Image (cartoon, rainbow, N blue to C red):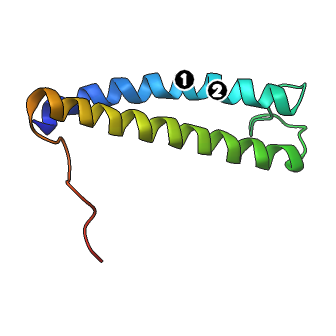
Amino acid sequence: MNAIFTPIGIVLGLASGQISKKIFDFIWGKVDNEEAPEPKHREIAFVKLIPALLLQGAIFRLVRGLTDHGARHVWRRVFGAWPGEERPDPE
């Protein structure tokens, strides 16, 4: 079952990346009037780059995680099996 879920997860991951970018652009527009700085820009202030990267990473991880987890719940409801591990391994 996991082999069938994997391509679905990849497609949902790509879609969640696009959604994350739109959310980040919207939020950054509220923070600053200029385009968000990116590492490829030569003349940028680290004081802007660091929070932009932190915010972008947090939004991406949140949207991707919620999308993946939600898709797994839908899969379980439809097919009756959880595509992945039930819980984290104990340390």
Quadrant for residue 71, please give it: top left
The kind of residue on which mark 2 rests is: Ile
Horizontal relation, residue 12 to residue 18: left or right: left
Tag 1, which secondary structure?
helix
Q: Can you give x and y, in whole percent of width and height, for residue 2 in the image?
A: 15, 38
The kind of residue on which mark 1 rests is: Ile
Decide: is 18 above or below 37.
above
Q: How far apart in space, not on screen, are marks 1 and 2 (Cα)?
A: 6 Å
Q: Quadrant of the C terminus?
A: bottom left
**Residue occupied by mark 2:** 23
Numbered badge on residue 5: none
Numbered badge on residue 19: 1
Q: Can you give x and y, in whole percent of width and height, for residue 16 in the image?
A: 47, 27
Pointer 1 local density, CA inside 10 Å: few below 14, some 14–19, many at least 20: some
Q: Quadrant of the N terminus?
A: top left
Report the residue at 18% width, 41% height from top: 83
Nearer to us in this view, 48 or 38: 48
